[in-house]
Amino acid sequence: MSSGFIVSAASIIGAALLPAFLLTPAANAAPNTWQMASAQIIDQTGFEQPMVAATIMVPAGMNTTGGVRWRNQPNDCPQGHTFDWQAASPDQLWTISIIPSERWGASSTGQPAGVVCNVIEVRSAKGFLQEWVKYYRSGARILDYRDRPDLEQSTAQLNHQTNLSGMRSSTRTDAGEVLIAYNLNGQELREAIAAVVVITESAFSGMGVGPDMTFLQGFNLPAFAMRAPAGSLNFAMMEKIRQSIKLAPEWSARINQHNQVMSRQNLNHSKKMHDIRMGHQRDMSAILTKGHNDRSAAMDRSHREFIESIRGTETWNLPGGGTTELADSNNAWQLNNGTIVTTDRPGWQPSDAGLSGTQLQRTR
């Protein structure tokens, strides 16, 4: 699973920028006698100067690396920014990590479902964590998995469904936590990873012209992990650390401004393109699940053109009103008897065959 994966309305865009643990209400955790210290998570490159993006309480003496990572290069996946940060004890056995977002997808066409980093079918937090462990913790053993309804409930506002003519789409969240075991330099370790994933599934009707098509896209909100020597992993402390994250107000304001600018630019572009990405997670999935509350004629046209490009068809205006969808060709005629004729022959007219009819115009 390569490094580097909404989706929909502005609320999803904003949520996709936050680590999953930031979306959870505080929970009562058992008191702990560890000495804690505040650490800063820095955005080094996002704006004109480095900014504190968030703070987190970690055990004193840990060394920190990483921060907010911006993916701006053409081959980066996904584009945008995410959290990628770690605190570690001097011996590297104890670690606290914020795991960056990834994006994946698959489709019935055999082609990637929009802009994705990995072509796989993952439909749950458990499936994502299994794939993540397989790639990033090669050789690790999965000891246990549990659902995290608290995380899932805190992201329930991302769930929605869209039903349009010839298209159905649903977006839902899922959350879970996995416990794994592995050996590092002769030391047996345990690590717990908690994650929220957002899954969008869309289906397009073939409308009798071609086969039905299905698309799956998913991504994880930045996840949280804690590692310790076997027998020492403290889940109550993990929760306290996870819940200690606080976004810096100034950085949050700048990110909101950035998202608003990106949303305006992409909204204009979306009138012509269905694979546009909105903010950190914008792509074709975002357009398909956007809510469509204010669906304009331009959006209807772009949806039709998207389907036509996959089916290899074109929509033509009929002389008496209405339209018809035909195999893609250079010219189309409706003969006087109502028959439709298409041809790629330059300059061909019905009179060449002793017939008469009206030349059709493409629907714009």
Image (cartoon, rainbow, N blue to C red):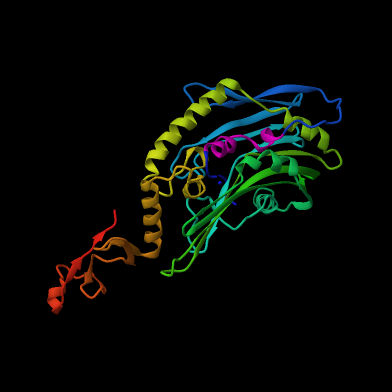
357 in magenta: no
At horizontal 62% and vertical 48% (from top left) the residue drawn is 172
At horizontal 68% and vertical 23% (from top left) the residue drawn is 39
Q: Is residue 164 left or right of residue 127?
A: left
Residue 244, given in percent of the width and then of the height, sits at 72, 27
Residue 226, given in percent of the width and then of the height, sits at 75, 38
Span of residues in magenta: 10-24
Compared to residue 227, the image places residue 129 above or below, namely below
Quarter of the figure with residue 158: top right
Compared to residue 108, the image places residue 296 above or below, namely above
Residue 74 seen in the current view: yes
Quarter of the figure with residue 201: bottom right
Looking at the picture, tell me which residue is in the foreground, 34 or 89: 34
Residue 252, given in percent of the width and then of the height, sits at 56, 25
Task: Decide whether the magenta segment is chiefly helix, strand or loop.
Answer: helix
Residue 281, given in percent of the width and then of the height, sits at 52, 42
Compared to residue 14, the image places residue 326 above or below, namely below
Quarter of the figure with residue 240: top right
